[in-house]
Amino acid sequence: MNVAAVLVVYTTVVGFAAPRLILRARWPHRAPALAAAVWQALAVSFSIGIALFAHHLAMPTEHLHAGLVGLLHSCGFDVEVGRPDPGLTDPLAVGVPAAVAIALAASFTFQVMRARRARAAHREALDLVGRHSARLSATVLPYDLPAAYCLPGRRPRVVVSDAAVRALTPEQLGAVLEHEQAHIAGRHHLVLASVEAFHSVFRRLPLARHAREQTALLLEMIADDRALRHHSDEVLATAMYEMAAARPPAGALAAGGHTVLIRLQRVLGPREAPHPALWSSVAAVAVAVPLLPLLVACPPGLG
Amino acid sequence: MRRLGDLEAEIMDRLWTWNRPATVREVVDDINKIRPVAYTTVMTVTNILYTKGWLLRGKQGRAWLYSPVRSREAYAAALMEDGLGASKDRPAALVHFVENMSEEEVAALRKALRNVGRQANA
């Protein structure tokens, strides 16, 4: 069977059908960390699938196994057995997959560096304008609306407005601060940068669009869960509502406000972890999915 | 060892609090009430703040008078809007607590909260 055709089918399934399947499922909001890992795994799997597909298009006559080994070898993996004759390797067969990898890596680096520069400038101004509160382990800014955000990275800052300090109870404020600390401790900005990078390379792909949107929401849920370890459901939910209700209504461009509603209903509703069997099978799929395109392109025992 | 940024913050803090143009000498004398600091150090850092665009200066007699370009509140509002993603070019990694919502969404939130309150009371 034509390997290139199988790879086309596989990447189509991963890029178009799999996102719908996950969006319809109920477990992602019950196990947000697992769901975020699945989106990452799908993105990796799709990228490898595309790279292998390009490789096979460029050298359809080459023996499969030699082609794969050649690809691995050209990517820096030192594969000892069956190293192909360099004279046989078509530059396109290596060049196109390499271009996919380089585009993804460059995009990720660009996202990380750009965000880091913006944060450094923001932090410098923040340290001049805000007042550090040792009690809250946060920077307090004079601002009329209750609000909070965080600057992740190497010298992180949690920022709250003085209106939030006044309007929220100490319990509620504690929940908000813990939510922000969870983003910093979990290095959520790197996860966001990776889906952002994937989206900027495969812009029109449903997987890229959904992975970016869903990952942002899932990271908020992970941070909510962290805040719920030490605070009650109602404290976190009320804090969310107080901060959301005080903000001016969103303009036409601001999107995604409904995610707060999803989060709030999740915080207030029954939050059962998925059944261990479901959890472990999804985890197994998340681990296996990045390897699948390799298995498709090079069935073990047939090389 | 204090960092340069700390002294910058101390200088800005005083100029914002006084809410009037001041000389380097006044700032030095005020910081010296808390801890010793050299005049030349404060002058250098004040000059850095001026070149970074945080301070305006004008000459009065032989001394420079410094004042903040904008109020602390104006800077804070700009930072908040940037941090909360209200500005156009949002850096990908500023994660914030809640986004702006429409009035209907806020109403839906309120309803969800009220329902839970009723269940808890019942």
Image (cartoon, helix red, strand yellow):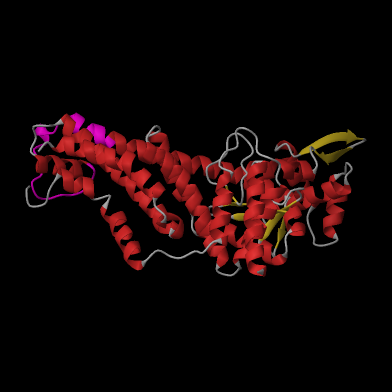
Give the residue at the far right of this rendering: B61
Q: Which residues are magenta?
A: A75-98
Q: Nearer the viewer, residue B106 or B82?
A: B106
Q: Position of residue A194 (x, y in %)?
A: 42, 45
Q: How many marks?
A: 0
Is A78 magenta? The answer is yes
Above or below, A183 against A55 in this view is below
Q: Nearer the viewer, residue A81 or A151?
A: A151
Q: Nearer the viewer, residue B88 or A103?
A: B88
Q: Answer with left or right where residue A89 lies relative to residue A147.
A: left
Is A184 magenta? The answer is no
Give the residue at the far front of this rendering: B122
Q: Nearer the viewer, residue A23 or A299?
A: A23
Q: Answer with left or right where residue A142 lies relative to residue A58.
A: right
Q: Position of residue A73 (x, y in %)?
A: 18, 44
Residue at 88 percent of width and 48 percent of height:
B18
Res. A281 in view: yes
Q: What quarter of the picture does the N terminus of chain A occupy?
A: top left
Res. A155 in view: no
Q: Position of residue A275 (x, y in %)?
A: 37, 66
Q: Position of residue A122 (x, y in %)?
A: 63, 44
Residue at 20 percent of width and 29 percent of height:
A92
